[in-house]
Amino acid sequence: LPDVSALNLKHWELDAERHQLIVTVSSTQAVACCPLCQSLTGRIHSRYERTLQDLPLAQFGLTILLEVGKFFCLNET
């Protein structure tokens, strides 16, 4: 997960019938480092959602819906 300071809690829901806590968070990260050339960019290409699930604890499972941005690398090479 990203640093907690770069996340925004958008919504949470406790589904008692399914014994599930669902948390929706979005990344507030304004810049990212290219994994290939290591240059920084702030140009967001698109957004997508990742789903993370954990095993039940105290009879409740946890699902995190994480909305993250996909960045363009500005390095032409």
Image (spheres, grey):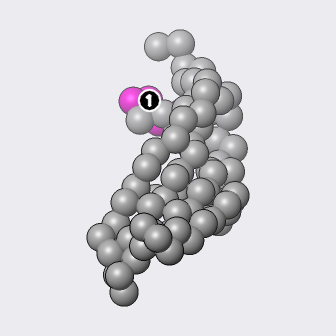
Packing grade of label 1 (10 A; few <14, some 14-19, many >=20) is few
Residue at point 56% right, 43% down? 68
Q: Which residue, given by chain and number where applicable, does mark 1 sit on? A: 37
Q: Is residue 50 magenta?
A: no
The image position of residue 62, as x and y in percent, is 43, 68
User: Quarter-wise, where is residue 71 in the image?
Assistant: top right
Residue at point 40% right, 77% down? 60
The image position of residue 23, as x and y in percent, is 56, 63
Q: Is residue 7 left or right of residue 16?
A: right
Disc 1 secondary structure class = loop
Of 5 and 60, the residue lying toward us: 60
Residue at point 62% right, 50% down? 27
Residue at point 56% right, 71% down? 14
The image position of residue 31, as x and y in percent, is 64, 41
- The magenta stretch spans which residues? 36-40
User: Quarter-wise, where is residue 73 in the image?
Assistant: top right
